[in-house]
Amino acid sequence: MKRTAFFISDGTGITAETLGQSLLAQFENITFQKLTRPYIDSAEKARAMVQQINTAAEKDGMRPIIFDTIVNQSIRDILAQSDGFMIDIFSCFLSPLEQELNASSSYSVGKSHSISHSANYMERIEAVNFALDNDDGARTHYYDKADLILVGVSRCGKTPTCLYMAMQYGIRAANYPLTEEDMERLQLPAALKQYKSKLFGLTIDPDRLTAIRNERKPNSRYASFAQCEFEVREVENLFRRENIPHINSTHFSVEEISAKILVEIGVERRLK
């Protein structure tokens, strides 16, 4: 079965998309064409959206699913005239929350993804800059300012994990690739020894690592299964020998890896 799903907002659409994606993921037997439509903030844009929704309904032979975080009621009223099935995310949660808190919501556009909380916004920017400046072992003299340092073989997911934690949580995460030379020494690189308490290891299945590396350097020694198997085996031995907490990243998303790391290492999120 195929259905169309719209994530519609008068802001960035991030909230509608995030929650909508999570809900749709529970229906594994249905294929969804997912369409995000941010900044639907005028009657004219709303009427254009109605046309898109109705076209999708006619094409699919079924009404599209609409997740919306539209604050303006007049715009919602226009969208409600479409042939879609609307789920108003805000009203689902804000109404009971207003009753519990005995207070009215401000119903303001884009509150969760704006820069109105400038301190949080700057934490996010500084964390992203830190992750970029301290990527791939390029610099090690700022490790004293790091919340954590990811270590592992090349292409096991360190960089995207660091950037996700920076963007999502404001975590200052550096990463250091362990090389064949490091493994031959059978000990931590000198740059990491004094920061051992900040280290967290990522490992990966050798066959998956081979596939990833072949996309970058096909038919090379670097991408060969024998080399990947050797590196993974030795780095896992190093993690165990040095008592470095670690997880296998093969079957987890960046979001799952990040959450597991923060729980395991006990680092507090700067953005809450």
Image: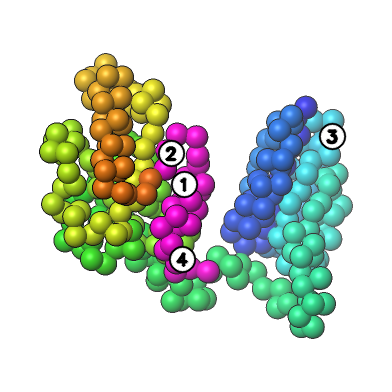
Real-space Cα separation, disc 3 to disc 2, in angstroms: 39 Å
Which residue is painted at 68% across and 40% down in the image? 25
Report the residue marked by disc 4. 269
Query: For the magenta stretch, what is the residue range?
Result: 247-272
Report the residue marked by disc 2. 249
Q: Is residue 73 left or right of residue 242?
A: right
Q: Which mark is residue 257?
A: 1
* Coordinates of residue 61 in the picture (x, y in percent): 84, 30
Q: Secondary structure at mark 1?
A: helix
**Quadrant the N terminus occupies:** top right
Say whether disc 4 or disc 2 marks the residue closer to the N-terminus: 2
User: Which numbered disc, 1 or 3, marks the residue closer to the eye?
Assistant: 1
* Coordinates of residue 121 in the picture (x, y in percent): 45, 70
Residue 103 visible in image: yes
**Closer to us: 228 or 65:** 228
* Total marks in image: 4
Report the residue marked by disc 3. 62
Real-space Cα separation, disc 1 to disc 3, in angstroms: 37 Å
Residue 99 figure quarter: bottom right
Identify the amino acid type marked 1. Ile
Look at the image and say whether residue 193 sits in the magenta stretch: no
